[in-house]
Image (cartoon, rainbow, N blue to C red):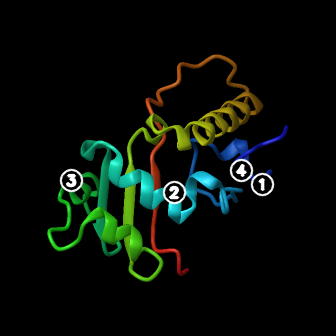
Amino acid sequence: MTLHCFENDVDTGLLDQKPYLFHHKLLGHPALELSNLARVIPALPKDRVMYSKGLLKNGDDFETTFRRRPADRSIEETIEEIRKVDSYVMIRSPEIDPTFADLHRELLSDVEALMRKQGVVEYRSMWNGVTLLGEAMNR
């Protein structure tokens, strides 16, 4: 099985059973380059883009935190400073922008392949879009 976005260390027996670590191949993907993100994200519909400054703590309400945009920081400033400041950017259905369409297809293809490997041959995709989530890149 050839995966485009994930390394081959995904243990499909653990899917939907418990949290575990696996590796990805997304570093350097053109859609995720900071220059592309800085150009595309601010142009997306505002209801699709959520961002936060600072890391969330266990127990924080994830959705509420993202709905409250930081009053002292724009999305442009958040992207510009993401390498140095702990912050998150979340995009709902990023594939509406053509620069994310290939990545979206590759992610779906990988997930479908992993599900087939686990024995799930028929399913109805509940994905109406992939969510991209990033945090400070200085880790």
Q: Residues within 10 Å of mark 4 (few under 14, many from 20)?
A: some
Dot label at residue 112: none
Estimate the x, y position of residue 134 in percent, counting from the top left.
Answer: 47, 62
Residue 130 shown left or right of residue 90 in the figure: right
Nearest to the observer: residue 49 or residue 64: 49
- Residue 130: horizontal and vertical position, in percent? 48, 40
Labels 3 & 1 near each other (Cβ < 8 A): no
CB within 8 Å, label 3 to label 2 = no
On the image, numbered disc 3 is attached to which residue? 67
Q: What is the CA distance from the residue labelled 4 to the residue labelled 1?
A: 8 Å
Q: Residue furthest left?
A: 71
Name the N-terminal-most of marks 2 and 4: 4
The residue at the point 32 percent across, 50 percent down is: 49
Q: Quadrant of residue 84?
A: bottom left
Count the numbered circles shown: 4
Task: Please state which of residues 118 and 22 is positioned toward the viewer in this rendering.
Answer: 22
Neighbourhood count class around disc 1 (C-alpha, 10 Å): few under 14, some 14–19, many 20 upward: few
